[in-house]
Amino acid sequence: MKLLIWYCSSFGYTPSLATLDDADPDPGTVEIRDAVVGFIQAEEADPLEASEVEKKVLKNLKWAAGKNETNRVVLHSFAHLSESKASPAFTRELFHRLQDRLENAGYEVFQTPFGWFLDLRMDAPGKSLARIFKSI
């Protein structure tokens, strides 16, 4: 698992190109304020350690949210952090589990539409702990 976390005072996207036959519905343009955005790449070996990987991703997202004084988390599938890739089915299910667990812990959670290339807009302040990379 590769995880790149950005704190964004504003994060927005517009779906531009569906990349999967079963891509999520196009939600149109979305803007989210004051959130940590997890750019997440599930890797080929992750299904073998799914429970441990999930636990570590949650820990890192919660920590980053706390350090940036927000309870908003955006989950974004970003298959550009490693050459190793898990299946789309595993990644999609992982994101749903992460969202459920974060919401149960009191976070407001958003997912970018799965299976799309997105036009992104980010306003990310240059402060300590606003950008974090983890290899899990």
Image (spheres, rainbow, N blue to C red):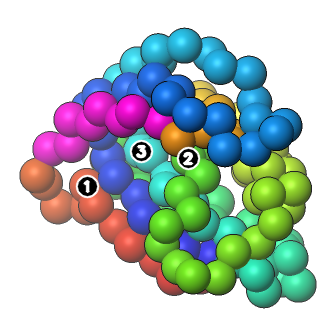
Residue 94 visible within the image: no
Question: Which residue is the site of mark 1?
Answer: 130
12 vs 130: above or below:
above
- Mark 1 or 3, nearer chain start: 3
- Asked whether disc 2 touches disc 1, contact meaning CB atoms under 8 Å apart, the reply is no
Circle 1: residue type = Ala
- Mark 2 or 3, nearer chain start: 3
* Disc sitting over residue 4 in the figure: none
- Mark 2 or 1, nearer chain start: 2
Residue 135 pos. (x, y %): 51, 82
Dominant secondary-structure state across the stretch colored magenta: strand
* Disc sitting over residue 36 in the figure: 3
Image quadrant in which the C terminus is located: bottom right
Along the line of sight, the residue nearer the viewer: 98 or 40: 40
- Asked whether disc 2 touches disc 3, contact meaning CB atoms under 8 Å apart, the reply is no
Mark 1 and mark 3: Cα distance apart in space = 8 Å
Along the line of sight, the residue nearer the viewer: 26 or 71: 26
Q: What element carries label 2?
A: strand
Of circles 2 and 3, which is in front? 2
Of circles 2 and 1, which is in front? 2
Left or right relative to 19: residue 71: left
Circle 3: residue type = Val
For the record, the magenta segment spans: 118-125
Circle 2: residue type = His
Residue 64 pos. (x, y %): 41, 56
Which class describes the residues within 10 Å of circle 1: few (<14), some (14-19), or many (20+)?
some
Residue drawn 11% across and 52% down? 126
101 vs 40: above or below:
above
Which class describes the residues within 10 Å of circle 3: few (<14), some (14-19), or many (20+)?
many
Question: Which residue is the site of mark 2?
Answer: 76
- Residue 121 is inside the magenta segment: yes
Left or right relative to 89: residue 120: left
